[in-house]
Amino acid sequence: LVESETEDVIRQLEHQISRLEGVLRLEKMITASGGKIFATNGKKAGFHTALKKCKEAGGSIATPRNPGENDAILYFVKNFNTYAYLGIKESLIPSKFQFLDGTQLNYTNWHLNEPSGKGEE
């Protein structure tokens, strides 16, 4: 009896999650790639505020690790007609970038002549 009740609760939770995902997809607030969910609240903020909000939500600032993830981030850029912060930073070597934890990037998709070093990259 306990196992049956647990299964019912799991099914109910899965249904609720599915409905919530559906609403968020309609509002263009989430997308997925490679088993990862990318989300936005649609608000503009500075990098440190965005980093804090992502951590509060149990995630991190998006860092594209392949073309599919890059496209997922571009989805928001195009739908909200704005920029997106990435979870990378310039390393101690000028014009070289790394993940926020200091590990080296294994995927990039820079525009021609970028990063240019003009302003904050």
Image (tube, helix red, strand yellow):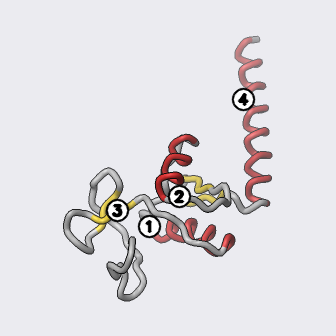
Q: Residues within 10 Å of mark 2 (few under 14, many from 20)?
A: few
Q: Is residue 96 left or right of residue 66?
A: left
Reply above or below: 68 against 49: below
Of mark 3 and mark 2, the one earlier in the sequence is 2
Work out how far the residue at label 3 is from the one at label 1, CA to CA, in angstroms. Answer: 17 Å
Badge 2 element: loop
Q: Quote the CA–CA distance across marks 2 and 1.
A: 9 Å
Reading the image, the residue beneath label 3 is: 89
Disc number lying in front (4 or 3)? 3
Q: Which residue is mark 1?
A: 66
The three-letter code of the residue at mark 1 reads Asn
Q: Which residue matches tag 2?
A: 34
Q: For the residues marked 3 and 2, what is the alpha-carbon distance in whole angstroms? A: 23 Å
Query: Depth-wise, is mark 3 or mark 1 nearer the camera?
Result: 3
Mark before the other along the chain sequence, 3 or 1: 1
Specify the amino acid type for callout 3: Lys
Image point (66%, 55%), residue name: 41
Which residue, given by chain and number where applicable, does mark 4 sit on? 10
Crowd class of label 3 (few under 14; some 14 to 19; many from 20; radius 10 Å)? some
Whether tag 2 and tag 1 are in contact, CB under 8 A, the answer is yes
Badge 1: how crowded within 10 Å, few (<14), some, or many (20+)? some
Between the C-alphas of marks 4 and 3, the distance is 40 Å
